Amino acid sequence: MLEFLNTIQVRLLNSDKPEKEKVFDFVADTFSYIPQLTDNDAGNYWNCDKTFVIDLPHKEARKIFSVERGAIVTIKTSDRKTHNIGTHNIPARVQISSNLTSANLIIKCKMLTDPFL
């Protein structure tokens, strides 16, 4: 089982100007994460949906992610390896739902390959 660091990086994709991608760093509560292999009529895919509890982000991030945005989410394991959820071709859909002192980082993503390989 992989042990994850509690930092999550979200790289917002801008289809108009790929060189101007914005990067957001969030601090999450301790979490476990296991993408599920799912069989479908169209074939197999990895369901990478996950909701992380994060510290309340600054106002700009809450405003940007108040609706779903295409992004690549990067999480790190304790051995400092990075794993991406989403790609430029099939980005993850990311949204933030704010609470009083924390927020939920909601990630919806279907991938064709295991993100941990």
Image (spheres, helix red, strand yellow):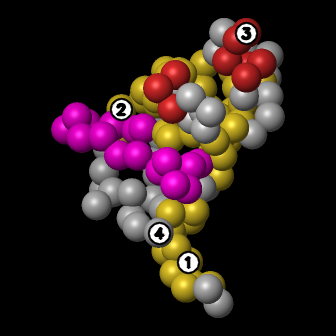
Quadrant housing the N terminus? bottom left
Q: Earlier in the sequence, mark 1 or mark 2?
A: 2
Which class describes the residues within 10 Å of circle 3: few (<14), some (14-19), or many (20+)? Answer: few
- Farthest-out residue, left: 79
SS for callout 4:
loop
**Residue 62: image location, x then y, percent:** 73, 19
Which class describes the residues within 10 Å of circle 4: few (<14), some (14-19), or many (20+)? Answer: few
Residue that mark 2 sits on: 5
- Farthest-out residue, front: 16
Find the distance from the CA under tag 2 to the CA under tag 3.
24 Å
Q: Earlier in the sequence, mark 1 or mark 3?
A: 1
SS for callout 2:
strand
Type of amino acid under label 2: Leu
Type of amino acid under label 3: Lys
Q: Determine whether 80 is above or below 59 in the image.
A: below
SS for callout 3:
helix
Q: Earlier in the sequence, mark 2 or mark 3?
A: 2
Left or right position of 117 against 108: left
Circles 4 and 1 in contact, beta carbons < 8 Å: no
Type of amino acid under label 1: Thr
Nearer to me, 111 or 6: 111
Residue beneath the point at 55% across and 85% down: 43
Find the distance from the CA under tag 2 to the CA under tag 4.
24 Å
Stretch in magenta:
74-92
Type of amino acid under label 4: Leu
Find the distance from the CA under tag 1 to the CA under tag 2.
26 Å
Quadrant housing the C terminus? bottom left
Residue that mark 1 sits on: 38
Residue that mark 4 sits on: 112
